[in-house]
Image: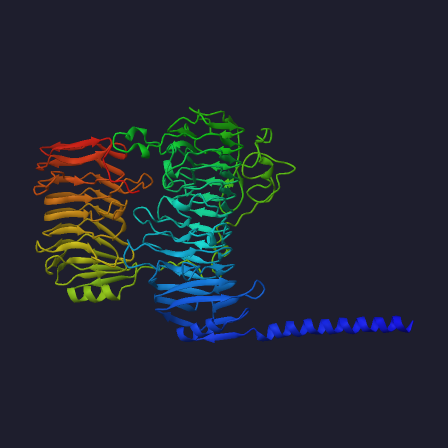
């Protein structure tokens, strides 16, 4: 008995000893974890060098300018090494600055990148060299805003992933204007393949139109790593006004998941550009029922599943249609278009979305005369299933299905439509139903009932589709469409507080514009500098003589009360109005006169890091060398002249310096309406986009209700209007009189170039060429 007691006592002592040792090591581990507050780059670099697992490096509040942070170290899953802001949002990274990470279990949080640009190819990179990458690391609760390179053609990436198991989460990222995707996952090297990165809970705010390609918000891989598995997840993000180009997300690798995201008023699509086996599940595509640039999902390549998505008032056409299934190129090279095969489009709901299913998108057989055989997209989709979908149209659509080429490789089954009594010309077995809408919150209404009697199509592996768009189980009472018939649905998907950095809001309080009365030249110069964005300068009657350019670097309106003339006496080749980054000028009811050698309006020759804008109305412009001179790498979303007379100028409106033939152009929309051009000698309207890039669907030229007299006398190519490569051109209801040119315009017949109701007197002709010979971009 004593031996047993002694044995128990020995065991108890050993247990106590082991417990004490564990406790001591735990306490030791906790005691060694330290917090180090740093106030400058030297202290930050020392803290990074000395950091151990679990350490917190705190960057002091304030402006950190011209810093290149290299964050290296090896934390652990339980004890990562962290760099964080003293107060989230109060640590400003400005100037020529960047952040790189390599090692394991590193975290960065609370930083605000603004008022600067990166000196490298990335603002944030998950590597510090070609060999040294980050793994299991995270950038979270940060903001990158307008952190643009000075030139639009200086391409870079704001966040670039390398390594494995890294995360970008709860960040707000917006305002990228230069070339290059906002975020890219890079797969070069075995250290970055099968990476399982996560891009989650972010708010991707407005990305303005770039005016050409290379403006994606997220790109997963590249053409030449497109056969590699990435396994990246993009989930629970808000994409708001992501308008950079036709592709919002460009998936170029295999086995990616794009799930539960909201695409709100974004002019582009989710595109399975290269690579295979992408799942696009449970996303919301929300338009306004008017803008025909808001897109959905464009499908290329093999094995994708597009399921449980809602398309609400999406009006995009062709490449931006709700579901666009492309033709491929037979034996396509990696950087072009592979044939669509073995794709599933199932359990989706479409509400008031025009022609939601489009097949053979991008077919270009008719352009065989001007394109090499390797560019002809003639391979139609094969073994593709479009099943269990619901279409609801408040206004009937006679063409819910468009076939640019035959959809003979597509299976249609168990799809229904409410078409408000309009007969369908090409239904592919669509079943007509009387449906009503159910309010599900966020000002969205969808049909959730009235089709319980439709037998659900059960394809191969369809049992893996276990939930609907809202996460409800399909196990017991499955039905077609994205949303099961359940009660009390109250979505809050457009609440911006659900996404991005918890300390930042992009909601801008509306400010009432202030009107400044201006009586003389000195007041004009002074008040232009003092005015805030959106203010109005109202000029009294009289003559304002200006000898130096007026700097436009904010949104400003300059208007006349009645009879005001601005005479610009500045030196040759300088503008009366210098359109700087962020400068958006509205000029109203003003006479503007030059000295024949200077310009009325011009962008900067360099460092146009952000967009400008110009609107001229009810004005009279005369005696300038150029009315508008836009230099290379400058971009305006809109340039508009309305109810304006332009006379006795050497050159008119020139937006033609993007001659790199990479698909770039200087403005998205050029509008000339109800104007009078008289004696403009050359470059009357000169607007250029070069390079064969079938996915670029701009720019846009409208010339209407205007008169052109005695113009083009010095035009070397004998064309009044030069708009080579512009995709959308409309020349209508104009009068052309005594213009000594051979052609008023040469239209691109294969694109959306049209002319109508024009009066032509001794002014050449308007000609249409079906296919223009253009330089291939690829």
Q: Is residue 694 left or right of residue 314?
A: left
Q: Quadrant of the C terminus?
A: top left
Residue furthest to the right in view is 1
Q: Can you give x and y, in whole percent of width and height, for residue 662 in the image?
A: 27, 45
Seen from the viewer's position, the closer of residues 284 and 41 is: 41
Seen from the viewer's position, the closer of residues 588 and 723 is: 723
Q: Is residue 744 left or right of residue 272?
A: left
Q: Quadrant of the N terminus?
A: bottom right
Is residue 520 visible in the rendered image? The answer is no
Relative to residue 37, is residue 186 depicted above or below?
above
Seen from the viewer's position, the closer of residues 699 and 548 is: 699
Q: Can you give x and y, in whole percent of width and height, for residue 123 in the image?
A: 38, 60
Is residue 226 visible in the rendered image? The answer is yes
Residue furthest to the front in view is 3
Numbered marks: total: 0
Q: Is residue 362 left or right of residue 465?
A: left
Q: Can you give x and y, in whole percent of width and height, for residue 491 in the image?
A: 54, 47
Q: Can you give x and y, in whole percent of width and height, for residue 111 in the image?
A: 44, 65
| Protein image colouring | rainbow
x 51%, y 47%: residue: 260
């Amino acid at each position: 008995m004593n031996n047993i007691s002694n044995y128990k006592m020995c065991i108890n002592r050993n247990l106590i000893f082991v417990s004490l040792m564990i406790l001591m090591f735990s306490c030791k581990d906790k005691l060694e974890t330290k917090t180090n507050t740093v106030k400058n780059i030297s202290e930050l670099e020392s803290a990074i060098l000395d950091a151990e697992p679990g350490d917190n490096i705190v960057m002091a509040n304030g402006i950190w300018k011209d810093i290149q942070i290299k964050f290296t170290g090896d934390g652990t899953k339980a004890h990562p090494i962290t760099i964080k802001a003293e107060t989230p949002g109060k640590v400003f990274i400005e100037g020529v600055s960047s952040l790189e990470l390599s090692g394991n279990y590193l975290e960065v949080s609370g930083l605000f990148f603004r008022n600067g640009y990166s000196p490298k190819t990335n603002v944030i990179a998950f590597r510090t060299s070609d060999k040294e990458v980050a793994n299991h690391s995270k950038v979270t609760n940060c903001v990158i805003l307008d952190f643009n390179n000075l030139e639009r053609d200086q391409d870079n990436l704001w966040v670039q992933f390398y390594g494995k198991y890294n995360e970008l989460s709860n960040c707000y990222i917006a305002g990228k204007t230069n070339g290059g995707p906002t975020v890219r996952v890079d797969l070069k090297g075995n250290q970055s393949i099968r990476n399982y990165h996560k891009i989650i809970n972010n708010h991707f705010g407005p990305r303005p139109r770039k005016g050409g390609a290379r403006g994606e918000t997220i790109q997963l891989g590249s053409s030449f790593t497109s056969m590699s598995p990435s396994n990246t997840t993009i989930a629970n993000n808000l994409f708001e006004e992501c308008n950079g180009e036709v592709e919002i997300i460009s998936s170029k690798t295999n086995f990616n998941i794009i799930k539960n995201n909201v695409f709100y008023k974004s002019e582009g699509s989710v595109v399975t550009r290269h690579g295979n086996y992408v799942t696009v599940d449970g996303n919301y595509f929300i338009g306004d029922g008017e803008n025909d640039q808001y897109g959905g999902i464009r499908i290329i390549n093999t094995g994708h599943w597009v399921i449980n998505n809602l398309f609400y008032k999406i009006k995009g056409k062709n490449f931006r249609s709700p579901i666009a299934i492309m033709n491929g190129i037979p034996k396509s090279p990696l950087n072009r278009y592979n044939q669509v095969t073995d794709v599933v489009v199932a359990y989706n709901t479409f509400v008031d979305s025009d022609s939601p299913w489009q097949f053979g998108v991008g077919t270009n057989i008719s352009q065989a005369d001007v394109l090499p055989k390797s560019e002809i997209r003639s391979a139609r989709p094969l073994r593709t299933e479009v099943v269990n979908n619901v279409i609801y149209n408040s206004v009937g659509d006679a063409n819910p299905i468009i076939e640019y080429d035959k959809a003979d490789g597509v299976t249609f089954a168990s799809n229904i439509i409410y078409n408000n009594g309009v007969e369908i010309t090409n239904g592919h077995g669509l079943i007509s139903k009387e449906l009503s809408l159910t309010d599900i919150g966020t000002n969205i209404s969808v049909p959730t009932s009235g089709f319980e009697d439709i037998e659900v199509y059960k394809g191969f592996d369809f049992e893996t589709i276990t939930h609907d768009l809202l996460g409800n189980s399909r196990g017991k009472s499955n039905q077609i469409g994205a949303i099961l018939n359940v009660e009390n649905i109250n979505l809050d998907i457009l609440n911006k507080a659900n996404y991005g950095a918890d300390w930042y809001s992009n909601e801008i309080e509306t400010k009432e514009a202030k009107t400044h009365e201006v009586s003389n030249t000195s007041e004009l110069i002074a008040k232009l500098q003092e005015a805030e964005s959106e203010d109005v300068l109202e000029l009294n009657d009289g003559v304002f003589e200006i000898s130096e350019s007026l700097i436009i670097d904010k949104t400003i309106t300059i208007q006349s009360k009645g009879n005001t003339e601005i005479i610009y006496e500045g030196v040759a080749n300088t503008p009366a109005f210098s359109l700087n980054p962020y400068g958006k000028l509205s000029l109203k009811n003003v006479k503007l006169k030059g000295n024949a050698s200077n310009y009325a309006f011009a962008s900067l020759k360099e460092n146009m890091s952000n967009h400008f804008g110009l609107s001229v109305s009810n004005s009279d412009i005369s005696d300038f060398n150029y009315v508008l001179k836009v230099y290379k790498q400058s971009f305006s979303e809109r340039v508009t002249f309305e109810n304006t007379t332009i006379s006795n100028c050497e050159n008119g409106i020139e937006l033609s310096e993007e001659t790199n033939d990479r698909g770039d152009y200087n403005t998205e929309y050029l509008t000339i309406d109800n104007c009078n051009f008289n004696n403009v000698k050359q470059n009357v309207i000169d607007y250029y986009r070069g390079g064969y890039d079938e996915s670029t669907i701009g720019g846009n030229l409208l010339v209407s209700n205007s008169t052109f007299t005695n113009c083009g006398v010095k035009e070397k190519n004998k064309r009044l209007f030069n708009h080579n490569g512009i995709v959308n051109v409309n020349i209508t209801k104009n009068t052309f009189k005594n213009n000594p040119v051979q052609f008023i315009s040469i239209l691109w017949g294969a694109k959306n170039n049209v002319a109508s109701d024009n009066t032509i007197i001794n002014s050449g002709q308007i000609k249409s060429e079906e296919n223009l010979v253009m330089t291939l971009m690829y």
